[in-house]
Image (cartoon, rainbow, N blue to C red):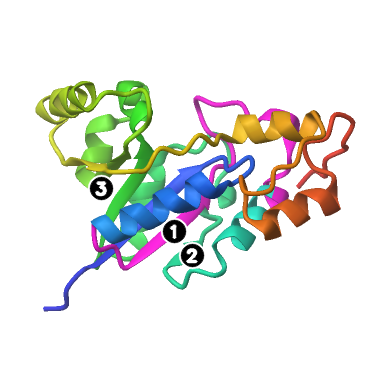
Amino acid sequence: MNKKQRVGIMGGTFNPIHLGHVITGECARKQFALDEVVFMPSKNPPHKVIKEQVSFTDRSNMVKLAIQDNPCFTFSDMEFQREGVTYTVDTLRELHQIDENREYYFIIGADSLFDFEKWREPESILSLATILAASRYGIPEEKLLSQINYLTDRYGGTIQVVHMPTIGISSSGIRQMRKNGEDVRYFVDEKVRYYMEEHKLYLENSITRKK
């Protein structure tokens, strides 16, 4: 019997993708012996408005640039192919239909665990994937472990912690820096920085392309 491939899923708006995202993916890969980490931009997430209206194409292109040097990182536009709001549980079900010989690990920020009950079908999500929660500055470990115990006692499944270095980078902060005319070097991959410059993304008067 073949051993199941261990696949991490990094979802998010990636608006834009930054070094914190790729470090999270790599920490999860190493700590949980993942064979692959799939970066999957959200098209129309249920609990988040995509700011600055940067197109899915631009967000996807930046993700591809940010991960291209890591052979264990791959890109998927699966959520773009679906109409309407894109829910995690639907994505995981589709992934299982495509390939049953995989174990899925859904990677999220630890802060998302405190909103997890608002997600569609949390019990189903936990039956379809192991949740890997990346530790975040400002969330004490005791509080995080208490929330994990609460969720698994109520919904079953497995939630584990990805231990992370402190990374003070956020997509919203990068967007604001761009608006202020500040240099985002060392916050994003250089190829991503060049892409933002070339396409004039996140500037005060930038015009985004629709697609």
Classify mark 3: helix, strand or loop. Answer: loop
Is residue 55 shown in magenta? yes
Classify mark 1: helix, strand or loop. Answer: strand
Q: CA distance from mark 2 to mark 3?
A: 18 Å
Q: Residues within 10 Å of mark 1 (few under 14, many from 20)?
A: many
Disc 1 marks a residue whose amino acid type is Val
Q: Is label 2 in contact with label 1 (beta carbons under 8 Å)?
A: yes
Disc 3 marks a residue whose amino acid type is Ala
Q: CA distance from mark 3 to mark 1?
A: 14 Å
* Residue shown at the point (70%, 33%) measured from the top left: 175
Q: At which x and y percent is residue 108?
A: 37, 39
- Front of the two marks 2 and 3: 2
Q: CA distance from mark 2 to mark 1?
A: 5 Å
Q: Residues within 10 Å of mark 2 (few under 14, many from 20)?
A: some
Sequence order check, earlier mark of 2 and 1:
1
Q: Is label 2 in contact with label 3 (beta carbons under 8 Å)?
A: no
Asked if residue 89 shows in the view, the reply is no
Sequence order check, earlier mark of 3 and 1:
1
Q: At which x and y percent is residue 76?
A: 52, 59
Sequence order check, earlier mark of 2 and 3:
2
* Residue shown at the point (66%, 54%) measured from the top left: 62
Would you say 85 lies left or right of 72 here? right
* Residue shown at the point (35%, 48%) measured from the top left: 92
Magenta-highlighted residues = 32-58
Q: Nearer the viewer, residue 41 or 82?
A: 41
Which residue is disc 1 drawn over? 38
Which residue is disc 2 drawn over? 74
Would you say 205 lies left or right of 42 here? right
The N terminus sits in image quarter: bottom left
Which residue is disc 3 drawn over? 129
